[in-house]
Image (spheres, rainbow, N blue to C red):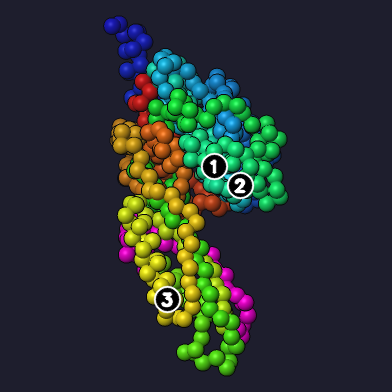
Amino acid sequence: MGRNEPEALKAALLPSLRIDGPRLWRSLMELAQIGATAKGGVRRLALTDLDRAGRDRVVGWCREAGLALRIDRVGNIFARRAGGDPLRAAVAAGSHVDTQPSGGRFDGAFGVLAALEVMRTLNDHAIETAAPLELAIWTNEEGTRFTPVMMGSGAWAGVYGVDPIHAQRDIDGKSVGEELARIGYAGDAPMGGTDGRGGFDAYFEAHIEQGPVLEARGLPIGVVAGALGQKWYDVIIEGMDAHAGPTPMELRHDAALAAARVIEAVNRIALSEAPHGRGTVGFLQVGPNSRNVIPGHAQLSVDFRHPAAEGLARMDAALKTACDEIAQRGAVKIEARLLVAFAPCVFDAECVGLVRAAAERLGLPHMDIVSGAGHDAVHVAGVSPAAMIFVPCKDGISHNEIEDALPEHITAGGNVLLHAMLARAL
Ligand SMILES: [Zn+2]
């Protein structure tokens, strides 16, 4: 083969291929203008006018990059770059463009725009992959305005039916179906993950870590091996309201005291499952909430997370035991109601290996990490091989207007995405 043969050119070019980091950063900052807040964050709730404006901007960029667009029935957007072999399933990447009410510039947007930057880079160098590439933008990942969280990817993966998703309403009574139509994103493409044809060959999602581990270790790349399973509960405690003065300590049915003991037990249970067990009480109400009344009622939330199903089961059993003991000791009734359960997710070993190998080839220090948060990739992984790439965020802070990341880390994550996708798609 001569030196100028396309194959030889490709082989020489690919190892040194890099994304345009400043272009990716500019796109992130431009998208962040849509719904920008005074404190430097972003407020772009799912299926609002601002979400439409954000979608329109990214869709415009996809058109400029020559990508073919389709929109499915829950408003997920797919932008395809043709491959040499149209029979092959797509190698996909993406995330979401909706944000929390006081969200940041990177959560979701990074994964979407890093995938776009991969397409732009390949266009710049006229590189054709064998498998088609696809950019996915999932509807309503944040679950702030409409439940459930990770709505679009869950519907795509067949976890939720389309009709019940369309019927979900926000606090003003507006439904997902109505709002999708209103903003012009009620598509008719089949729900890819569920029709037996449209699953991906692989799906990669780049995301900020949303935790402090990578920054603390000084590492630019996290190779995400999976995501913690979750169990969420409402714990309801019934005691008896009584006067704070005349009621002796040993004759009380103090629901707030029992709640305090449950909080302590949740913390102890999570610590006994170190290093990856997590236990949080983030919501607590006592009634009647009066200074001189022993509270007869308390309600609190429990959020347990663990990387293994057996670990979650142990935490569940320990919570029930603790509630029984605390109820008996405090002469109150305690009921722990399970609200939500997500099984732990283990990402596809081959895709995880491609992410790790890409980081190594690029000379980027990395570690294996388990995601403490849910992501669209967790639903996608139920249907197609998937993996994630984490980059550090400042002080581990996310779901906050001060969320921040360094340009060099954003570039590093984009390059790992590029090389992981190429390795799969060539
Ligand atoms: Zn996100």
Q: Which of marks 2 and 1 is nearer the N terminus?
A: 2
Q: Which of marks 3 and 1 is nearer the N terminus?
A: 1
* Magenta region: 267-293
Res 326 label: 3
Q: Which residue is disc 1 drawn over?
A: 151
Q: Where is residue 33 in the image (x, y as percent from the top left)?
A: 63, 40
> At 52% across and 69% down in the image, what residue appears?
236
What separation in Å lies between label 3 and label 2 (alpha carbons)?
36 Å
Is 279 included in the stretch rendered in magenta?
yes
- At label 1, which amino acid type do we have? Met
What is the secondary structure assignment of the residue under circle 3? helix
- Say which of 91 and 29 sits in front: 91
Quadrant for the N terminus, please: top left
Q: Is residue 251 above or below residue 304?
A: below
Q: Is residue 9 above or below residue 70?
A: above
Mark whose residue sits in front, 3 or 1: 3
- At label 2, which amino acid type do we have? Phe
Res 264 seen here: no
What separation in Å lies between label 3 and label 1 (alpha carbons)?
37 Å
